[in-house]
Image (spheres, rainbow, N blue to C red):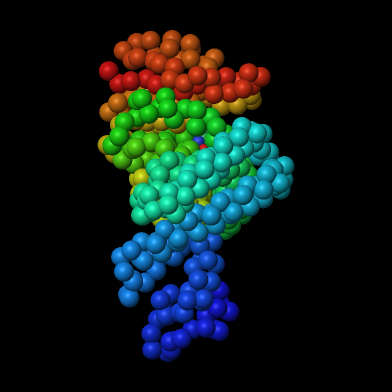
C-alpha cells in the first residue's frame, strides 16, 4: 500500500491530510483491495460520488460489495487452514478436539454463502436486482457469522496477561481457555433453544465468561439488548501498596483473561466483511466486570434479565464445583428479573434440584445433550424466577 501512495499520489501531503479520494483510480483500487484485509470499516464506504449518476453509483456499490465479500471468503479459507494446521497451543495445552464438527459448519456455511452470492450476481446481471440491499443480506450475514465463529470461537487465537513476581504484566497467548470454551457447534445447536427463553431486548450477564468468546457468540446470535461479561480473573491480581510496591491481595493466580483483546480480534475479522454483513459485537457488550459468580456484588447493581454461564466443570472437577453452581444459581436468581441459564453436566441436575428444593423454581433442561456419546453429557438448564 505504501508503494501505491508514493508512486501515484496526486495531491500534496504538506497541505492536507491524505484521503483515499486523493488517489487516482489504480491507486485507489490497490488501496481498497489491500485495506479490505486490514479490517478498516472506513474502507467499506462507497466510492466517491461526484460525477456519477445514481445508477452508476449503485453499480459501483454492488461491485465493491461483491469484491469485498469474495476477498473475505479467501481470507476465511486462509484463516481456517492456518488454525487447522496449528492445532493446539505451542505448549500442547488447549489441543483442539472438536474440529470436525466445527469444520462441517464452516464448510456448509461457505458453500451456502457462495450459492447466495452467485445467485445475487446472476440476478444483478439479469437486471432483476439493482441494489446491494436486494441481495439476500440476512442469510448472507448468518453464513458469514457462522464461518467466522466456527473457526475462530474455539480454535482461534486469544490473549491473557501474566505477571512476574513483582507484578510486571506481559501479554501472552491464552492457550488454556480454549479447553474451556465450547466447540462452536454446541453453541450453534443451543441457540434455537436459548432463544425460546432469552428474548429480544433482554439484558444478559455471562457470569463465568472467561475468554469472553461465549458472550460474543450470544451477542452475534441472540437478539439481546446487551451482554455483560464477568469472571473472577478479569482484573490484575496486583495492586500497589502504600509503599508503592505491587502486592497480590488474596489472589494466588498470576493470570487474567483479556476478553477485550479477544473481542477486538474477532471484530477485526468481521470488519473484513462488507459493512452490510458485519456484525458489531461491541454494540451488544455491556462491559467487562471482575466479580465472583456466587456474590455478584457489581453485576447485581445492574438491571439483568438473565444470568447465564458455563460453570467450571471437567473430569477432574472437584465436588466443590457443584456447590459453586448451587451458590451461583441462588445468587443469579436473586439479582435477575427472569432467571438463570447455566450449562452443566447432566448428572449434576438431580442434585441441583434437591439442593434448590425449598425454592419455588422451575427447572428445565433446555437443550438436548450437547456432547458426543462418549463424552460427559452437557445440558443447558434454565431456572426461572417465579
Ligand atoms: C468453563 S469456563 C467458561 C468458559 C467461557 N465460557 C469461555 O468461552 O471462555 C469457567 C470460568 O469460570 C471462572 N470461574 C471459576 N470460579 C468462578 C467464580 N466463583 N466466579 C466467577 N467466575 C469463576 C473461571 O475463571 C473460568 O473462566
In front: 244, or 64? 64
Left or right position of 185 against 231 = right
Horizontal and vertical percent position of residue 263 = 48, 49
- Can residue 86 be seen here? The reply is yes
Give above or below for 177 relative to 327: below
Q: Which residue is drawn at 51% across and 62% down?
A: 36
How far across and down, in percent of the image, does residue 342 sit?
Answer: 44, 26
Q: Residue visible at 36% across and 66% down?
A: 56
* Badge count: 0
Q: x, y (%) of residue 251?
A: 52, 42
Name the quarter where the C terminus is drawn.
Answer: top left
Q: Position of residue 315 (x, y in %)?
A: 63, 24
Furthest residue toward front = 126
Left or right of 147, for residue 329? left
* Residue 65 in which image quadrant: bottom left
Tell me if residue 325 can be seen. Answer: no
Position of residue 309 relative to residue 38, above or below, is: above
Q: Quadrant of residue 48?
A: bottom left
- Using the image, determine if residue 32 lies above or below residue 366: below
* Screen quadrant of the N terminus: bottom right
* Residue 353 picture quarter: top left
312 or 120: nearer the viewer: 120
Q: Closer to the camera, 147 or 161?
A: 147
Residue found at x 40% / y 16%: 364
Q: Residue at x 52, y 40 (%)?
A: 112
Amino acid at each position: 500500500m505504501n508503494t501505491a501512495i508514493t508512486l501515484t499520489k496526486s495531491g500534496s501531503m504538506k497541505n492536507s491530510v491524505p484521503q483515499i479520494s486523493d488517489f487516482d483510480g489504480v491507486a485507489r483500487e490497490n488501496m481498497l483491495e489491500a485495506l479490505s484485509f486490514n479490517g478498516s470499516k472506513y474502507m467499506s464506504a462507497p466510492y466517491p460520488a461526484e460525477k456519477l449518476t445514481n445508477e452508476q453509483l449503485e453499480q459501483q456499490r454492488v461491485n465493491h460489495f461483491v469484491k469485498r465479500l469474495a476477498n473475505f471468503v479467501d481470507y476465511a479459507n486462509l484463516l481456517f487452514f492456518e488454525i487447522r494446521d496449528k492445532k493446539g497451543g505451542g505448549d500442547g495445552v488447549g489441543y483442539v478436539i472438536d474440529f470436525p464438527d466445527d469444520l462441517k459448519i464452516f464448510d456448509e456455511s461457505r458453500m451456502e454463502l457462495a450459492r447466495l452470492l452467485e445467485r445475487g450476481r446472476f440476478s444483478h446481471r439479469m437486471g432483476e436486482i439493482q441494489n446491494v440491499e436486494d441481495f439476500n443480506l440476512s442469510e448472507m450475514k448468518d453464513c458469514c457469522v457462522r464461518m467466522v465463529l466456527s473457526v475462530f470461537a474455539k480454535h482461534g487465537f486469544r490473549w491473557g496477561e501474566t505477571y512476574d513476581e513483582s507484578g510486571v504484566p506481559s501479554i501472552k497467548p491464552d492457550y488454556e481457555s480454549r479447553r474451556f470454551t465450547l466447540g462452536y457447534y454446541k453453541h450453534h445447536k443451543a441457540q434455537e433453544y436459548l432463544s425460546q427463553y432469552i428474548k429480544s431486548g433482554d439484558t444478559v450477564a455471562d457470569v463465568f465468561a472467561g475468554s469472553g468468546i461465549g458472550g460474543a457468540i450470544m451477542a452475534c446470535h441472540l437478539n439481546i439488548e446487551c451482554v455483560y461479561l464477568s469472571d473472577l480473573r478479569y482484573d490484575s491480581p496486583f495492586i500497589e501498596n502504600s509503599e508503592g510496591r505491587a502486592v497480590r491481595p488474596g489472589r494466588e493466580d498470576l493470570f487474567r483473561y483479556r476478553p477485550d483483546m479477544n473481542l477486538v480480534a474477532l471484530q477485526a475479522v468481521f470488519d473484513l466483511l462488507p459493512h452490510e454483513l458485519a456484525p458489531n459485537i461491541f454494540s451488544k457488550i455491556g462491559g467487562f466486570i471482575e466479580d465472583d459468580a456466587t456474590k455478584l456484588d457489581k453485576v447485581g447493581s445492574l438491571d439483568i434479565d438473565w444470568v447465564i454461564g458455563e460453570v467450571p466443570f471437567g473430569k477432574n472437577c472437584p465436588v466443590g464445583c457443584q456447590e459453586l453452581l448451587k451458590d451461583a444459581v441462588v445468587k443469579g436468581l436473586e439479582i435477575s428479573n427472569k432467571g438463570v441459564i447455566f450449562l452443566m453436566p447432566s448428572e449434576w441436575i438431580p442434585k441441583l434440584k434437591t439442593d434448590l428444593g425449598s425454592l419455588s423454581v422451575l427447572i428445565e433442561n433446555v437443550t438436548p445433550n450437547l456432547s458426543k456419546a462418549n463424552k460427559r453429557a452437557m445440558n443447558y438448564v434454565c431456572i426461572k424466577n417465579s
